[in-house]
Image (spheres, rainbow, N blue to C red):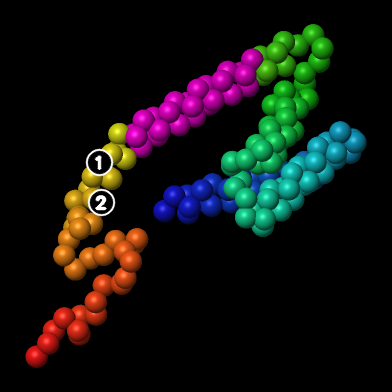
């Protein structure tokens, strides 16, 4: 169920970017070198994510995945700032402040969830070990019919013990 939701969200994100690229191209906003380079870099990041997925690595964990997502976030900076921003406009500073706040809140939430997972795992690990051990029969090493690994001879065969 979770994979379907993530796949649907990813599909919607791809469709949105295809629509955005098409509308920018039809409006004639891709005439400058800057927007064309940003879209080419976006295509390169998508290719990097596809290559990472094909290699079997996680798309959200690891150094490569984090670096790709950070580059994607940096690529969206000019889109967030907008084209009406000039040097006298304080909008860019507000965007940077907002992004820093979002990153800090996300990092705090992620670390809190990781800490909670570790605490819960340690709490329930003992009960899981106890639950696994209860179902097993404990055998003493000197029980009759058993031999130690360091015994000088193997135990007798069952057929030789039963004499009729």
Checking the image for residue 132, the label placed there is 2
Which residue is at 69% across, 26% downward? Answer: 80
User: Residue 84: image x %, image y %?
Assistant: 77, 21
Q: Number of labelled discs?
A: 2
User: Residue 102: image x %, image y %?
Assistant: 57, 22
The quadrant holding residue 17 is: top right
Q: Nearer the viewer, residue 134 or 147?
A: 147
User: Residue 89: image x %, image y %?
Assistant: 75, 11
Residue, disc 1: 127
Label the magenta part by its dominant secondary structure: helix
The quadrant holding residue 78 is: top right
Badge 2 density bin: few <14, some 14–19, many ≥20, Cα 10 Å: few
Residue 29 included in the magenta stretch of the image: no
Residue 118 included in the magenta stretch of the image: yes
Q: Nearer the viewer, residue 60 or 102?
A: 60
**Residue 122 appears anywhere in the view:** yes
Which residue is at 59% across, 24% downward? Answer: 103
Q: Nearer the viewer, residue 71 or 15?
A: 71
Could you say whether the residue bearing mark 1 is in a helix, strand or loop?
helix
Residue 106 appears left or right of 17:
left
Q: Which residues are magenta?
A: 97-122
Checking the image for residue 20, the label placed there is none
Q: Nearer the viewer, residue 40 or 114?
A: 114
């Amino acid at each position: 169920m979770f994979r379907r939701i993530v796949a649907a969200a990813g599909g919607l994100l791809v469709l949105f970017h295809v629509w955005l690229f098409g509308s920018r191209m039809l409006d004639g906003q891709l005439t400058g070198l800057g927007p064309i380079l940003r879209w080419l870099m976006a295509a390169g990041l998508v290719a990097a994510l596809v290559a990472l997925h094909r290699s079997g690595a996680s798309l959200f964990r690891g150094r490569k995945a984090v670096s790709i997502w950070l580059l994607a976030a940096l690529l969206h900076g000019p889109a967030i700032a907008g084209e009406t921003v000039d040097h006298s406009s304080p909008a860019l500073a507000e965007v940077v402040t907002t992004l820093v706040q979002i990153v800090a809140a996300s990092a705090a939430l992620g670390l809190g969830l990781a800490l909670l997972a570790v605490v819960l795992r340690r709490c329930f690990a003992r009960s899981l070990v106890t639950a696994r051990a209860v179902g097993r029969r404990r055998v003493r090493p000197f029980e009759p019919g058993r031999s130690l690994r360091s015994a000088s001879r193997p135990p007798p065969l069952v057929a030789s013990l039963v004499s009729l």
